[in-house]
Amino acid sequence: MRVLRVRTAAALAAASLLAVPWAVPEALPPGAATAAAALGALFLLSPPSRPALAATALAHLGLWPLGWGGGPWAAGLAAWALWACPGGGAAPPNGLDRFFVAHDYPGMRVNSHLFLDLLSPPDRPALLRAVARLMEDLPVARSLVWEAPLGVMRAVTSRGTFRPEALVDWHGAEDERTEAEALDAPFRLARRPPFRLRVGPRPGGGWRLVMSVHHSAADGTGQWVLLERLLAGYAVAGPAAGGPPPQPRFRRLLAPRGGRWLLAMVRRHLRPMDKVGVRNASVLEREDARPGLTRHRQASLGPEAWEALRAAAHGRGSSRNDLVLASVLVASDAWRRARSLDDRPFRLLLPTDLRPLLGLGPSAGNYVGVVRAEFTPAEVRSPALPDLIRDRVREGRTLEEAVETPVNLGVLSAVLPPWLFRRALRRFDLDPRSFFFSLLVSTIRVPPGLAWPEGLAVERAWIRGSIQRQPGVGVVLTTDDRGAEVVFEYREGLSTEAGVEDLLRRFLAEVERWVRSAPGAQVAVQG
């Protein structure tokens, strides 16, 4: 494969600079040997890029007249790699992208999955055509991520590099565990694009199409952009229509606010050691276990229940999301008390899309911030809990607060080499002294204008991701006009199916309590 040959050629050309001081030491000016060796070591430890390959070729050509016999050969090797190297077209990885690359290791995946439950199988030729068009439309969909000891880069391959058939897995009937193993399989980002599809029959009838995306390529909003382009290719034959324009990098979006503002945000939020040794409440049956496969339990809230929940929230001056969060907290507290666990504060991890705050429209990439909401056990048991949630979440959704995660991860991923950043993330996540987040709660709305192609009979669409040990349990609601799909994602080893089912039942009972409080409500919540 050309990609592998490019990386090999770049490594050989850079390594050959290390041999220069020993090959022609007497012919080199003072300091030239050290400079050549340093340049070779730097390029060898960095991912191949066009500027680095051009500098390598020029260095070899410059050393050739001084007696370096390998100059023409090594320069030609670097020149070929420069010609064959995948070019630009997608934004370079930002701090969040680099974080998700580093956070992918054995025992931890950052795969996000968008499920389409179908009444009938999709048309195979149309789906393969759609995959091809997706890669033509969006450069990130045909990109590779190259990691080296000193850095990470994203390279966009030329159109037609990958066959659509290689990215679609048509499988037969399988049980939930087999599906979980396939979804947790690692992405080979250095050789394959950051997305893949699985298509097969569902247990109990119907079909399922799953688009899995590596989180370094897109967050929840970005994954819908990829799906929209896929559906557009499925619906219409013909040439690619072209995707949305590339989005600027985070630091360019924040730069207009001025250096003082950026420095203030770094001083305000860059406190990685504050997370060490903090022990908040969890809903895990074994906090000290090694995480296993990512699994999930699921329930549906129909349109009547979802609308009644909105009415109940409106009647008390809250939002529907406030009542969802209140139900999660009350259910979690009851779950812990039923197991005689000690009282600890709850800290919710609430992903929030920063695009509206940054003046961006929907796009691929990662522009996600985090709202942290903390509550004592007494507050969770208080009738005023929805009001507390409303005030704290509203305060946390300002740019100055929600930008904490991009600031932390952007700075750390910029100053730490990938291997060291990955090691630090792994040590923190598995640290038995710490439990920083209690639960992840994410509400993702299906884009209102999303058009399902004719012939693709979609019963429901929903999302789940991969969850790390801290918090170990995630609650993901995928909402549209037809209601909400509720998914409780968890890790084997940390939680059991029975334990998560109990937590889900308690959550649904709390939702039903709020639904019944709505004026004239006659709706039961169905799990």
Image (cartoon, rainbow, N blue to C red):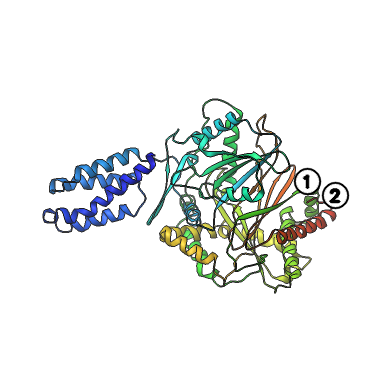
Work out whether residue 314 can be spotted. yes
Question: Mark 2: which amino acid?
Answer: Val
> Disc 2 designates what residue?
523
CA gap between label 1 and label 2 equals 9 Å
Query: Based on the displayed image, in which of its 4 quarters is residue 456 positioned?
Result: top right
**Camera-side residue: 417 or 400?**
417
> Which residue lies most toward the bottom here?
342
> Which residue lies most toward the top here?
238
Label 1: element kind: loop
> Disc 1 designates what residue?
302
Q: Judge the density around disc 2: few (<14), some (14-19), many (≥20) Cα neighbours within 10 Å.
A: some
**Camera-side residue: 268 or 351?**
351
Which residue occupies 23% across, 43% down? 75
Query: Reading the chain from its start, which is encountered first: label 1 or label 2?
Result: 1
346 shown above or below 196:
below
Question: Mark 1: which amino acid?
Answer: Gly
Horizontal and vertical percent position of residue 439: 65, 61
